[in-house]
Amino acid sequence: MNLREWRKKAELSSRELGERCGLSEAAIRHYETGARRPRPAIAKRLEAATNGEVTAAELLGVAAAAPSGKSGVSEETTRFVHTQLDPALLKEAASYGLDADEIARSAVERAVKAERLKRFSEENREAIESWNDLVEREGLWSDGYRAF
């Protein structure tokens, strides 16, 4: 049984289920549609809120199994990336309260953002140089108004 089916069966609104487990109504909707995959700790809270009728394992697999047209998120954007990390390192990270999944996701986001910025700068190098030349030659319109 998926989260939405359970919630409907329990006659709860998204807001009410969110209040049970300390999540926003929007987060519940994202998890129900597969637009976002809950972190393992949140999946366990949802499992507890559903009295185990929806398991954390099911919740962690929701995004990959979601129909691609339903949430507006394609299957390509929801695939899981599996990497091999040293189990001892993962255990140590968990002992410090670190979420390895969240750290990996964040690192990929930073890398994508840096690459996007690099490519933008390369693709628009001429326009940026032209603008810089213009500012150097003409100055900024606000030059006479600045107090510094």
Image (cartoon, rainbow, N blue to C red):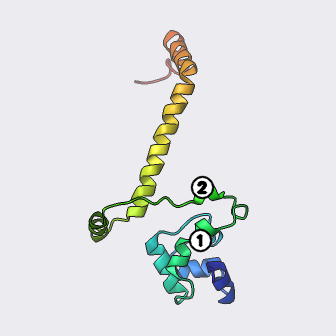
Q: Which amino acid type corresponds to the residue marked 2 in the rendered image?
A: Thr
Image quadrant occupied by the C terminus: top left
> Which residue is rendered at x = 51% and y = 77% of the image?
57
Residue 14 % position (x, y)? 63, 77
Q: Which amino acid type corresponds to the residue marked 1 in the rendered image?
A: Val
Q: Is residue 30 visible in the rendered structure shown here? A: no
Residue marked by disc 1: 62
Which of the two residues, 78 or 147, is positioned nearer the viewer here? 78
Residue marked by disc 2: 77
Secondary structure at numbered mark 2: helix
Q: Is residue 135 visible in the rendered structure shown here? A: yes
Assess disc 2: are there few (<14), some (14-19) or many (≥20) residues with their C-alpha within 10 Å of its C-alpha: few
> Which residue is rendered at x = 52% and y = 16% of the image?
135
Q: Is residue 42 left or right of residue 24?
A: left
Residue 33 % position (x, y)? 65, 69
Image quadrant occupied by the N terminus: bottom right
